[in-house]
Image (spheres, rainbow, N blue to C red):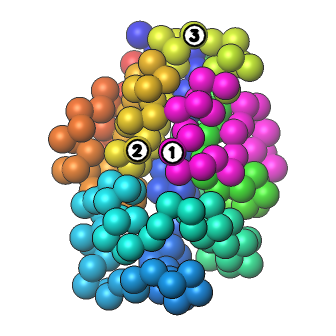
Amino acid sequence: MLPRCVILDFDGTLADSFPWFVSVLNDVARRWRFKTVGEAEHAALRQLKATEIFRRLEVPGWKLPLIAADMRRRMAQDIDRIALFDGVGEQLERLHATGVCLGLVSSNSAANIRRVLGPRLWGLIPHRECGVGVSAKHGRLTQLLRCAGFAPEQAIYIGDEVRDIDAARRAGMAVGVVAWGYNDAALLRRHRPDLLFEQVHELSTRLLR
């Protein structure tokens, strides 16, 4: 059944921000006093859930909001280095043209997301929850659906991490994941999402068929 509401993650799903993330990670680590990461370990990070990454890097929970805020500030300064994955704009346009309601739930800031999307694409997404805490996505998904007037069974959340799968399921929604984001596709498959998108064009072709 065609979902009436498609809610999207941003980093790793719409925007190719992982290269930027790993480029600043060690500077952030030195500032906030957690373990740095060698270049050879970058691929290994994609095999881990967010909670496992925090344990591996020895990040205490109380620092997470501070680190997240620092990362958002740094991205704002480097925003010209962040771009959408090729074809994402066309997919958003196509979904919107069919009458599907678009939403967005992301840990990133509204200001950063708007600058990367641009005014046209930003305007296609009327329902947004930004600056979401690491473990708070399911609550924000529920809140967005309530505000938009949809039941969970009418919607799908599309992300790129295991925590996106967990959040959607806690919110009672279907969940799709993309193979080009932060978590490796093989790891995502093991968590049995409803859909796995291998290529960007599938965001519309698989949802609209």
Disc 1 to disc 3: CB gap under 8 Å: no
Q: Earlier in the sequence, mark 1 or mark 2?
A: 1
Q: Residue at x 37, y 56 (%)?
A: 51
Badge 1 amino acid:
Ser
Q: Which residue carries the number 1 mark?
A: 135
Of badges 1 and 2, the one in the foreground is 1
Badge 2 amino acid:
Arg
Q: As rendered, which of 38 and 88 lies closer to the eye?
A: 38
Magenta segment, which residues?
Answer: 118-143
Q: Position of residue 9 (x, y in %)?
A: 54, 44
Disc 1 to disc 2: CB gap under 8 Å: yes
Magenta span includes 128: yes
Disc 3 to disc 2: CB gap under 8 Å: no
Q: Residue at x 24, y 38 (%)?
A: 191
Q: Quadrant of residue 80?
A: bottom right
On residue 151, the disc is 3
